[in-house]
Image (cartoon, helix red, strand yellow):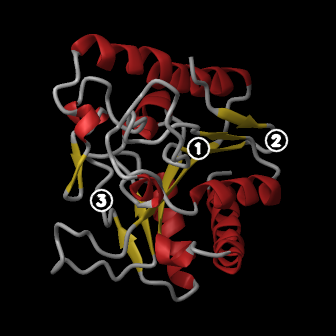
Amino acid sequence: MHRPELLPGTADILLVADHAAADVPPGINLGVPPALMGDHVAVDIGTDALTRRLARTLAAPAIIATVSRLVVDLNRDPDDPGAVPASSDGHIISGNWDLPAAERDLRIAAIHRPYHDSLAAQIASQRPALIIAVHSFTPQLATRPDEERPWPVGILYNHDDRGARAAILALATRGLHVGDNQPYSGATLNYTLDTHAEAAGIPYVGIEVRNDGLRDQEGVARWTHILADCIASVRRSLA
């Protein structure tokens, strides 16, 4: 059974990083070149370092995934076929093609369920006033070369936009071009926040940082400063 890493904190903000890891548990062969495990299809580049720095800066607890989303995508409904992807941005994940149902069920039981159980337990023991999901996105999808992604940062949300509206305002005030439910819409890709925040009435923000801004320590430090200020502003707006 694979559980996420929990970083303790005293703030009433919970940070979550669903796609922070590129690790593959022993016994699972994805059938892809090793180099692909450093690509955006396998991991949200930079989010591990960013989430850890945000947790220290905000004194906030954080839950950080420890398994690649090519093994199982923790931000998807377990019944969604894409929860165990057979392909991603033009790459065939051959080890997931024709995966026996028993193996798929085992991954859900051993990885997906413990992750979300850990989130639920953390929220029950230390209910946050705000949940922040930290993600990153690639500047350009290989399968959509003509699609522009000009935003250095995007804010995602579903029905509850309390946190999102405050976050968009805080980032736009800095002069940043903010994607409003871009490059993905929280109306369709929001499983973790729908399950643990929206369903519980807890305000939340889904943050997507373009990963070319997180490729080195300087970039991570810059975005830590920007997002820590943004998150603090959102928290004050909810008081």
Residue that lies at the very extreme toward the bottom in this rendered image: 175
Q: Position of residue 225 (x, y in %)?
A: 72, 73
Left or right, 70 with reference to 232: left
Mark 1 Cα-neighbour bin, 10 Å: few <14, some 14–19, many ≥20? many
Whether the residues at callouts 2 and 1 have beta carbons within 8 Å, the answer is no
Q: CA distance from mark 3 to mark 2?
A: 29 Å
Which is nearer the N-term, disc 1 or disc 3?
1
Q: Which mark is residue 16?
A: 1
Which is nearer the N-term, disc 3 or disc 2?
2
Which is nearer the N-term, disc 2 or disc 1?
2
The kind of residue on which mark 3 rests is: Tyr
Mark 3 Cα-neighbour bin, 10 Å: few <14, some 14–19, many ≥20? some
Q: Which mark is residue 202?
A: none
- 208 vs 152: above or below: above
**Residue position for label 3:** 184
Closer-to-camera residue (93/65) = 93
Tell me which residue sits at (50%, 81%) in the image.
Answer: 172
Tell me which residue sits at (40%, 60%) in the image.
Answer: 40
Residue that lies at the very extreme toward the top in this rendered image: 102
**Residue position for label 2:** 9
Mark 2 Cα-neighbour bin, 10 Å: few <14, some 14–19, many ≥20? some
- 94 vs 180: above or below: above
Q: CA distance from mark 2 to mark 1?
A: 13 Å
The kind of residue on which mark 2 rests is: Gly
| Mark 2 residue element | loop
Q: Position of residue 207 (x, y in %)?
A: 49, 59
